[in-house]
Image: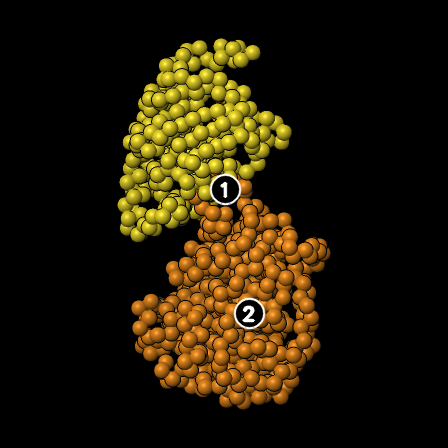
Chain colours: A yellow, B orange
């Protein structure tokens, strides 16, 4: 599904990712943990194609060279990023936004555009999946949403667009205990043999729900350690210092 | 009532960048740029009293109207073009314009079947429903091609309610008293240069009268089309809503693509009597010229409504995407106590377009309220100015005004300018003004793209969201058209 080899990324000559390697197979859930500022969000944006980074290395995504694609082509290819800081779009309703996006994505994936009634059915079904109150569908995208509501809305959009690889950048931060469970259950329901998740988080709690197959620790722009679920438990207990110490 | 905000203005920005290759605007094809092959009667170019007499005679007008035209013409001769707008207007040779063009066949039509098929196909191309069966769509249409009104649909159905909806010429013939009572009362021919010119040479337009207590059961609509080359269009619209009447009126405009500039100098007058309401919406898509500023319509229009009666209401909504140059300030004179004036505007200046548009709210009556929402969009090398006057006379107590003027800039070769003027002579007036200028943030585009939208789709979506408050004021079919127009006009842009 995804194969990252020796990835470097910098902004204004400041190196952030420094030779990162990562491999995700279909059906897997990977977690990335790591201290603030270690480059987790940068990795997610480099994958999604945000402009402004100087990038070296290679990223293969389902046999395509991801770095050759503009952001929307990556979305069409099945990549989704749930933003750590979702953006507000004044005057554009959530439903309208999703209809435009879904039509385009379906069109590019060779699927027919949905009839209005089918779209309505789908949007209700996916809103229910993450227990997003239908009133949020007619509100402008993320405008005046609380922090937790924005995060839930990201997962709703993910459910609508049915990606192959979904990157969740700290989706759990800002969610209350119940919301966290609901979002985690939603993600679990969306898991299939042929899709994968890359979950960036600081907390054990989301991982308790999601049961990731593989956990990575990102420190100073590199994957410092990879393990199974127990690595997350170890980090919870010991923090990152022991790993940082190992680096030196 | 003929105040122009003649305030000295800062020098126009230097936008001397000429390199077309660097221009990030691809020239889009103007969808309505076709020319129809219609047999035309065109008066020779030039303006003098003879031409005015000829037009008046051609339309079999009464003497009082000819007199009025001539007075307007003589007044116009002593006027100069307004210079205060943030516009660069090349000198116009008023002797090089033909002041009357009419399809030859269109004398007087009794039914749609008599309409010249070529004219009908022109309107079909424009998507204007002239067919009676489209009555279901609930829109009655008056279509003005060049100088004359070609056909007015659904006249009978409206007549049942006592509503008059016809061409201006017909109104002069059939309802001379109504026309005489109101013509030039809201926009006198002395008002400004282009209003005087229009008063002298206007050839047709629409007339609407809604009787007491009648709610017009359908949207009324006029479609203006300039077809003939070398002509100007000078239409005049007059709408009178009697006590407790209500009408919603829509106006659309297109013109063929030509390298020459053509002048459109219209006048619209609205009169709202006690507790009546007039909603007037415009979707203006005159040919804007190409990316280098060659060709396009000069849209110099005077629109004003008079809230004459108590608790009357006039609401202007405009979506201005076309024209090479727009000079236009739909205004409301709030004379009746408790009357309300509204102005909702989206003005787009892309390519090399220039727009100087806004409104005037003149508060005379007590407890009068006005609301101004202006959304400017500048792109390419477009120059967009909002100019608005809120004037509160001493007599007007307890006035409230709210103005919001937003500007959206796309790219760094365009300009946005805001000129709000306030003349508040009543101590208890509550006047609020907010203005913002923004760009489309890169992160916003990126977010949309991450969801699968292309740059162009993302921009169209964002711009439509930005203009939503105004677009929501339009009737449904027009809102759909306006959204498409905004998207088309912005195609080829990079955020
Ligand atoms: N545009 C930029 N300009 C300058 N520095 C940047 C820029 N973007 C990221 N950085 C820096 O790169 C480093 C990595 O940032 P990133 O957002 O990827 O961290 P993170 O691992 O997601 O942290 P957190 O856990 O706090 O979300 C930080 O030190 C940050 O300040
Ligand atoms: Mg982060």
Q: Is residue B6 left or right of residue B279?
A: right
Residue drawn 41% across the image and 77% down it: B120
User: Mark 1, mark 2: which one is toward the viewer?
Assistant: 1
Residue drawn 61% across the image and 27% down it: A14
Residue B428 at least partly seen: no
Q: Quadrant of ligand 1?
A: top right
Where B158 falls versus B448 (above or below)?
below
Instruction: Find numbered disc 2 in the image and state the secondary structure of the residue it sits on.
Output: loop
Pick the quarter of the image with the C terminus of chain A: top right
Q: Which residue is mark 1?
A: A70
Residue B80 at least partly seen: yes
* Label 1 – label 2 distance at C-alpha: 35 Å
Picture coordinates of residue A25, whole percent (x, y): 37, 28
Picture coordinates of residue B43, whole percent (x, y): 58, 85
Where B322 falls versus B467 (above or below)?
below
Label 1 and label 2 in one chain: no
Picture coordinates of residue A9, whole percent (x, y): 56, 29
Circle 2 Cα neighbour tier, 10 Å, few/some/many (<14 / 14–19 / ≥20): many
Number of marks? 2
Residue drawn 45% across the image and 84% down it: B106
Q: Residue furthest front?
A: A63
- Does the CB distance between marks 1 and 2 fall below 8 Å? no
Closer to the camera in the image, A27 or A91: A27
Pick the quarter of the image with the N terminus of chain A: top left
Closer to the camera in the image, A73 or B339: A73
Q: Which residue is mark 2?
A: B257
Residue drawn 68% across the image and 55% down it: B19
Query: What's the chain of the residue with tag 2?
Result: B
Query: What's the chain of the residue with tag 1?
Result: A
Where B82 falls versus A57 (above or below)?
below
Instruction: Find numbered disc 1 in the image and state the secondary structure of the residue it sits on.
Output: loop
């Amino acid at each position: 599904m995804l194969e990252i080899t020796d990835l470097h990324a910098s902004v204004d000559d400041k190196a952030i990712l420094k030779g990162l390697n990562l491999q995700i197979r279909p059906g897997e859930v990977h977690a990335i943990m790591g201290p603030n500022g270690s480059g987790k969000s940068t990795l997610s944006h480099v994958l999604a194609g945000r402009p402004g980074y100087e990038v070296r290395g290679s990223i293969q995504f389902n046999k395509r060279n991801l770095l050759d694609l503009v952001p929307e082509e990556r979305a069409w290819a099945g990549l989704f990023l749930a933003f750590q800081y979702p953006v507000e779009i004044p005057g554009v309703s959530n439903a309208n936004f999703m209809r435009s996006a879904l039509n385009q994505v379906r069109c590019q994936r060779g699927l027919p555009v949905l009839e209005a009634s089918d779209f309505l059915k789908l949007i209700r079904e996916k809103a229910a999946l993450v227990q997003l109150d239908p009133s949020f569908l007619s509100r402008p995208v993320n405008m005046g949403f609380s922090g937790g509501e924005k995060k839930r809305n990201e997962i709703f959009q993910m459910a609508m667009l049915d990606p192959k690889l979904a990157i969740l950048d700290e989706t759990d931060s800002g969610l209350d205990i119940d919301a966290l469970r609901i979002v985690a259950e939603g993600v679990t329901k969306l898991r299939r043999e042929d899709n994968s998740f890359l979950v960036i988080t600081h907390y054990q709690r989301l991982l308790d729900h999601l049961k990731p197959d593989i956990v990575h620790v990102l420190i100073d722009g590199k994957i410092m350690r990879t393990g199974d679920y127990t690595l997350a438990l170890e980090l919870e207990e010991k923090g990152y210092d022991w790993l940082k110490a190992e680096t030196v | 009532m003929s105040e122009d905000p003649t305030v000295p203005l800062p020098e126009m920005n230097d936008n001397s960048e000429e390199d077309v290759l660097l221009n990030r605007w691809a020239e889009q094809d103007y969808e309505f740029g076709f020319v129809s092959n219609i047999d035309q009667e065109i008066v020779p170019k030039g303006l003098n009293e003879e031409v005015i007499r000829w037009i008046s005679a051609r339309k079999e007008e009464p003497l009082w109207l000819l007199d009025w035209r001539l007075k307007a013409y003589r007044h116009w001769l002593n006027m100069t073009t307004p210079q205060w707008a943030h516009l660069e207007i090349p000198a116009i040779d008023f002797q090089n314009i033909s002041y009357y063009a009419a399809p030859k066949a269109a004398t007087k039509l009794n039914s749609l079947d008599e309409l010249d098929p070529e004219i009908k196909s022109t309107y079909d191309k424009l998507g204007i429903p002239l067919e009676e069966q489209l009555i279901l769509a609930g829109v009655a249409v008056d279509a003005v091609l060049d100088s004359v009104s070609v056909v007015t649909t659904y006249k009978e159905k409206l007549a049942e309610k006592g509503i008059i909806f016809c061409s201006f010429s017909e109104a002069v013939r059939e309802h001379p008293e109504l026309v005489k009572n109101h013509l030039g009362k809201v926009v006198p021919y002395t008002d400004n240069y282009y209003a005087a010119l229009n008063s002298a040479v206007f050839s047709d337009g629409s007339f609407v009268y809604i009787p007491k207590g009648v709610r017009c059961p359908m949207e009324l609509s006029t479609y203006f089309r300039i077809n003939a080359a070398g002509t100007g269009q000078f239409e005049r619209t007059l709408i009178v809503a009697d006590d407790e009447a209500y009408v919603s009126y829509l106006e659309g405009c297109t013109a063929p693509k030509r390298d020459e500039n053509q002048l459109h100098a219209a006048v619209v007058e609205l009169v709202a009597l006690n507790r009546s309401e007039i909603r007037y919406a415009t979707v203006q898509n005159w040919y804007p010229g190409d990316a280098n500023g060659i060709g396009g319509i000069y849209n110099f229009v005077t629109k004003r409504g008079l809230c004459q009666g108590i608790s009357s209401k006039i609401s202007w909504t405009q979506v201005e995407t076309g024209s090479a140059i727009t000079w236009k300030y739909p205004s409301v004179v709030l004379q009746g106590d408790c009357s309300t004036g509204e102005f909702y505007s989206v003005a787009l200046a892309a390519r090399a377009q220039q727009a100087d548009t806004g409104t005037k709210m003149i508060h005379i009556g007590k407890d009068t309220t006005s609301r101004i929402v202006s959304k400017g969009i500048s792109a390419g090398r477009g120059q967009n100015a909002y100019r608005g006057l809120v004037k509160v006379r001493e007599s007007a107590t307890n006035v409230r005004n709210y103005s919001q003027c937003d500007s959206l800039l796309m790219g760094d070769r365009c300009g946005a300018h805001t000129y709000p003027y306030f003349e508040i002579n009543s101590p208890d007036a509550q006047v609020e003004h907010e203005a913002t200028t923004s760009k489309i943030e890169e992160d916003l585009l990126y977010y949309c793209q991450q969801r699968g939208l292309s740059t162009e789709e993302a921009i169209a979506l964002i711009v439509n969201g930005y203009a939503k408050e105004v677009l929501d004021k339009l009737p449904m079919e027009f809102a759909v058209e306006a959204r498409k127009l905004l998207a088309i006009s912005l195609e080829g842009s990079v955020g």
